[in-house]
Amino acid sequence: MNEPFVLDNELFLKLEKWEQHTSRLCAGFTTKNGGVSSPPYSTLNCGLHVKDEPSSVLENRKLLADELSVPIQTWVAGEQVHGAKVAMVSKKDRGKGAETMETSLNDVDGLITNDREVLCTAFFADCVPLFFFDPKKELVGIAHAGWKGTVKGIAGSMVEGFRELGSNPADLLIAIGPSISQTNFEVDIKVVENIDHKYQSKVTKHLNNGKFLVDLKKLNLEILLQYGVPRNNIEVTKYCTFEDKNLFFSHRRDGGKTGRMLGFIGLF
């Protein structure tokens, strides 16, 4: 498969192929470039929960909003607690988490909407962004899947959420976005023990030092297949946030002091 995320400009990559279904779709993932934040958040940090100047973060978000022609007042964000809770959001939720963390949706790591003019957003710096689009029902969603959220099954929670809104999993298009690759995600046995046994051999490599390499992209893919999403409907990026240092922030590479990219999807 071709790379699903195409660099549109300095600020973000677009899910270009999905836009062939409808020109109303706005979906993509920011880079770390083109913003105003100072090191170690330079320059397009979109996360308010790191120790960047809030005014810089808001300016970065507004730069993106202007570039997308999508007002920041239409954005919605979850609190992101590395869980598996999914929220169904609508126009009444617009603005929550858009300009302050305090208004973000409590305990939420996944968002789904069937409303127009709602931009579902989430923040990343190695964790896996999962983008969802049902072109038949015109539903969209995004999930923040760190290793904890992944093993708790947020991918499956998202599919179930779409099902509740009338989607058939066979109709869902899913893109697994820029995140840390297996080569760079070394963990101890405690992490591996949390992975369902039926997936462990497919997504882990045992190292000589007793540690493991875990493929979070593949783990999310395997979970989505279990929930009835056809393999041909799932696209997986080749981008690695750790390796592609000119494009992305990486929590692990940057020693925890770094910015956040924004994943976004909505119909307008």
Image: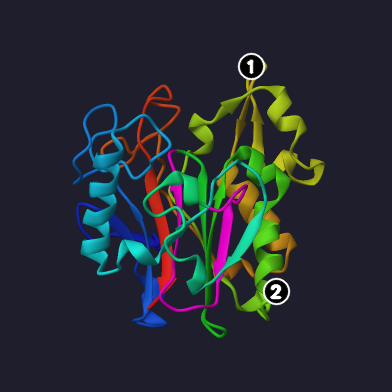
Observer able to see residue 133: no
Q: Nearer the viewer, residue 176 or 113?
A: 113
Query: Would residue 11 appear left or right of 261 to someone viewing this image?
Result: left
Q: Is residue 93 above or below residue 144?
A: below
Q: What span is in magenta?
A: 105-125
x%, y% of residue 14?
Answer: 33, 63
x%, y% of residue 191?
Answer: 69, 29
Question: Among all residues in the image, which is located at the extreme right?
Answer: 197
Q: Nearer the viewer, residue 232 or 126?
A: 126
x%, y% of residue 30?
Answer: 32, 51
Position of the C terminus by quadrant: bottom left
**Disc number for residue 208:** 1
For label 2, the crowd category at 10 Å Cα-Cα, with few meaning under 14, some 14 to 19 and many 20 or more, is few
Quarter where residue 1 is shown: bottom left
Q: Residue at x 20, y 44 (%)?
A: 35
**Disc number for residue 163:** 2
Q: Is residue 261 above or below residue 7?
A: above
Q: Nearer the viewer, residue 186 or 253?
A: 253
The reply to whether the magenta stretch includes residue 108 is yes
Question: Among all residues in the image, which is located at the extreme top?
Answer: 209
Q: Residue at x 26, y 38 (%)?
A: 246
The three-letter code of the residue at mark 2 reads: Arg
